């Protein structure tokens, strides 16, 4: 299991980091975004979407649990499980179909789905550090390791 740590100062740099992450992604990838409210998970997702060619607004899917994006031929699903009280709600929303169909799946608050969500390829843990954010990125699969390598290199 490999991991790297970085510090990102400011919203614009967070978007830039998201763009770098998005450019490094391979398809059929599952990414967990851990961190408290305001840690920057949605901001980073905005960058990922931008790298994949999306130009519109990115809304937080807190109330809907998931926001779908059609990016040319590809699909990205952005989950936010913050409001989910019971991991069983994942079954009701049909999350298996999303994971199967999605080329890229990003999940905020994945711990809310513990026991039901499969393990990720990559996990990012974001932490508020004064005016900046610390990020730890850990790979849990070969796919994740390759993303990590291209981010580090
Ligand atoms: P989350 O989705 O984790 O709740 P958001 O992405 O909505 O968090 O970001 C919350 C706030 O943090 C926003 O105001 C955003 O501008 C700010 N922010 C994001 N990334 C950084 C960063 N690297 N440094 C400083 N502020 C940041
Ligand atoms: Mg968010």
Image (cartoon, rainbow, N blue to C red):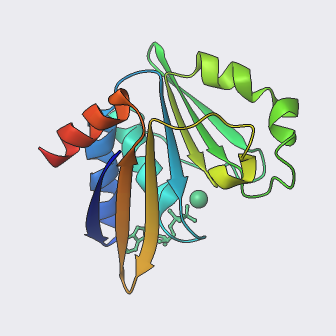
Image quarter of residue 19 = top left
Picture mark count: 0
Picture quarter with the C terminus: top left
Instruction: Name the residue at 33% across, 61% down.
Output: 14
Instruction: Name the residue at 71% across, 47% down.
Output: 114
Above or below residue 102? Residue 1 is: below
Would residue 130 appear left or right of 89 to someone viewing this image? left
Above or below residue 87? Residue 5 is: below
* Residue 121 percent location from the top left of the image: 45, 35
The quadrant of the picture showing ligand 2 is: bottom right
Residue at the top extreme of this rendering? 73
Picture quarter with the N terminus: top left
Q: Is residue 57 visible?
A: no
Would residue 100 appear left or right of 133 to someone viewing this image? right
Instruction: Name the residue at 46% across, 60% down.
Output: 125
Instruction: Give 63 or 24, whichever is nearer the viewer.
Output: 24
* Residue 122 percent location from the top left of the image: 43, 42
Above or below residue 61? Residue 12 is: below
Instruction: Name the residue at 27% across, 54% down.
Output: 16
Image quarter of residue 147 = top left
Residue at the left extreme of this rendering? 153
* Residue 111 percent location from the top left of the image: 67, 54
* Residue 23 percent location from the top left of the image: 27, 35
Q: Is residue 66 visible?
A: yes
Would residue 14 appear left or right of 87 to someone viewing this image? left
Residue at the bottom extreme of this rendering? 130
């Amino acid at each position: 299991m490999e991991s790297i740590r970085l510090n990102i100062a400011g919203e614009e740099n967070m978007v830039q980091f998201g763009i770098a992450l998005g450019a490094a992604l391979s398809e059929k990838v599952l990414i967990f975004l851990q961190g408290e409210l305001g840690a920057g998970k949605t901001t980073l997702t905005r960058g990922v979407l931008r790298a994949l060619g999306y130009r519109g607004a990115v809304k937080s899917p807190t109330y809907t649990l998931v926001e779908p994006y059609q990016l040319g031929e590809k699909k990205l699903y952005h989950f936010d499980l913050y409001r989910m009280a019971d991991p069983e709600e994942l079954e009701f929303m049909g999350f298996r179909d999303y994971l199967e169909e999605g080329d890229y799946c990003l999940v905020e608050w994945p711990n809310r789905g513990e026991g039901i969500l499969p393990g990720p390829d990559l996990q990012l843990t974001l932490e508020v550090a004064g005016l900046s954010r610390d990020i730890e990125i850990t790979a849990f699969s070969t796919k994740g390791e390759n993303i990590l390598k291209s981010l580090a290199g």
